[in-house]
Image (tube, coloured by chain):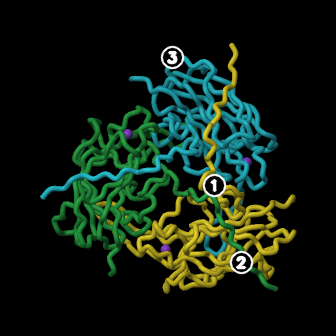
Chain colours: A cyan, B yellow, C green
Amino acid sequence: KEHDAIRLADKGGCSDCGRPMADKMADFALETQGASVISTRCSETYRIRSACVTLFGFPLWYPSESPRTVIQGYPVLLPGKCWAFHGVQGILVISLSHPVRITHVTLDHLPRYNSPTGRIDSAPKDFEVYGMKNDTEEGTLLGTFTYDENAESTQTFQLPSPSDEVYRYVELRVLSNWGHVEYTCLYRFRVHGKIAST
Amino acid sequence: KEHDAIRLADKGGCSDCGRPMADKMADFALETQGASVISTRCSETYRIRSACVTLFGFPLWYPSESPRTVIQGYPVLLPGKCWAFHGVQGILVISLSHPVRITHVTLDHLPRYNSPTGRIDSAPKDFEVYGMKNDTEEGTLLGTFTYDENAESTQTFQLPSPSDEVYRYVELRVLSNWGHVEYTCLYRFRVHGKIAST
Amino acid sequence: KEHDAIRLADKGGCSDCGRPMADKMADFALETQGASVISTRCSETYRIRSACVTLFGFPLWYPSESPRTVIQGYPVLLPGKCWAFHGVQGILVISLSHPVRITHVTLDHLPRYNSPTGRIDSAPKDFEVYGMKNDTEEGTLLGTFTYDENAESTQTFQLPSPSDEVYRYVELRVLSNWGHVEYTCLYRFRVHGKIAST
Ligand SMILES: [K+]
Ligand SMILES: [K+]
Ligand SMILES: [K+]
């Protein structure tokens, strides 16, 4: 009795159509892949939702999102499903999943059309990215970037002068936001590049 | 040493292609945004899966889905990942995330092609939507609608006579379904409109 | 006072555009639908991520993924979000959600462009699928298939000689992988066919 393998070809082939380029690159800041948040350098988490109610038996308490949310790769960006920190300046130090020669970083924020206010003033604006070989050194500035509130939800930035240096840690420093006076929200941050042979 | 910001443009631009219009509007019934289910007015939750088995160390007990499932914004509709209630009539009272001038509502159900039976007879058919300014008042009928079992999975309905009234609560009353004699299943319900300046 | 139902038509209609055919078929191995993993016949789970660190108050311990991951229908494939077993041979016995006349099976693996190494050498290569009417019988070979490391991420296979037999259990036997010497990873496995009238 013989069984032949038959694989069905998927025609159409526009499966990439419309997806941001970041979705087609490896992300070395992804938690499932082994990355982790190791510090926020005392950035203070902001509790957007403070509701703590139980009614008719449903638990209605919303824990604030932790910084880990930023590297967990949720398939859709849901309003409020982000790490919020007080003010406009916040820091995230990430232990990468692998040693990497970094070429790009990506920042995601909720699309404006999904925002209840029609604004995304809690989105980061200017931010810096640093690379570190170990978790004690100072860090090398890899680039200063600006998230554009009027552009696509997922924005990928090329490093201005990518080097052959291999980094194991990345520090994201948000410097300003788009106008929200109380907090800034990070939905997702990704790190792209070439894995270093170890 | 200077670092210039370089943002990569995402060409293609068909990222909206094929997505239902509801995905491009704010949803004021979304739990991550601050909405909550405050009552089901004694609708009886139906336990679709009653399995409670442990074999080879894997826990195989399936808790029934709570009404919160309906406003949690899951990125894909998985069969059975819905709030099921006994019979054809069920009620969901939602505290909206913000005070809103409501213009549309959306009801999602599992696509027929993903249903194991090829039918979606547990889908809601006729339903009413009420708006309330507080959680004690009667509620104003905003519209009576019909979910079409033969149309798209995600169906958005425009209110017949949208007003300037600002509502903080919405009541969804399902009146009938597409033929299932035991239960009706709600996958997702969304509320759209303009946020009221507070 | 009368309220007329107005349903908004979603134009565009390319919502299927680019999605694999497997996404448009019912999946009888899906946990939310009632399926369950009942055995792995002593396949040894491999712990890809062994990190167990707590730093600055963040819990950083990664539990290994269980075989249930393979039938939970996650909307995106995240690297490492898979059931890994030691070596190249592993077995998964699934109790289907309904009795089925099986026509196709689907195997998903992480796309190569999302892999940190650019390789998917932990992907299954050759595998067999068996059908069982009860959980004690031997099992009938339904087909031997090969997952192609160079083809689409989601691959659907037609059974070479589909019969009228109704099966309640399916056994997946992975026989080889694409070169990884330590482990093989299963991201998702699906079973398609016609539900049997019961
Ligand atoms: K925002
Ligand atoms: K159904
Ligand atoms: K892999």
Q: Residues within 10 Å of mark 3 (few under 14, many from 20)?
A: few
Quarter occupied by the C terminus of chain C: bottom left
Mark 2: which amino acid?
Answer: Ala
In whole angstroms, how far apart are the C-alphas of marks 2 and 3?
A: 62 Å
Residue at the spot of label 1: A63
Residue at the spot of label 2: C5
Residue A164 numbered tag: 3
Query: Is the CB of mark 2 within 8 Å of ligand 2?
Result: no
What is the quadrant of residue A171 in the picture? top right
Q: Residue at x 33, y 80 (%)?
A: C197
In whole angstroms, how far apart are the C-alphas of marks 3 and 1?
A: 41 Å
Tag 1 or tag 3, which sits nearer the N-term?
A: 1
Q: Chain of mark 1?
A: A
Residue C29 numbered tag: none
Q: Chain of mark 2?
A: C
Percent position of residue C194, x then y: 34, 71
Q: Is residue B53 above or below residue C178?
A: below
Name the secondary structure under disc 1.
loop
Mark 1: which amino acid?
Answer: Pro
Q: Do marks 2 and 3 share a chain?
A: no
Mark 3: which amino acid?
Answer: Asp
Q: Chain of mark 3?
A: A
Q: Are marks 2 and 1 in contact (CB under 8 Å)?
A: no
In whole angstroms, how far apart are the C-alphas of marks 2 and 1?
A: 39 Å
Q: Nearer the viewer, residue C167 or B147?
A: B147
Name the secondary structure under disc 3.
loop
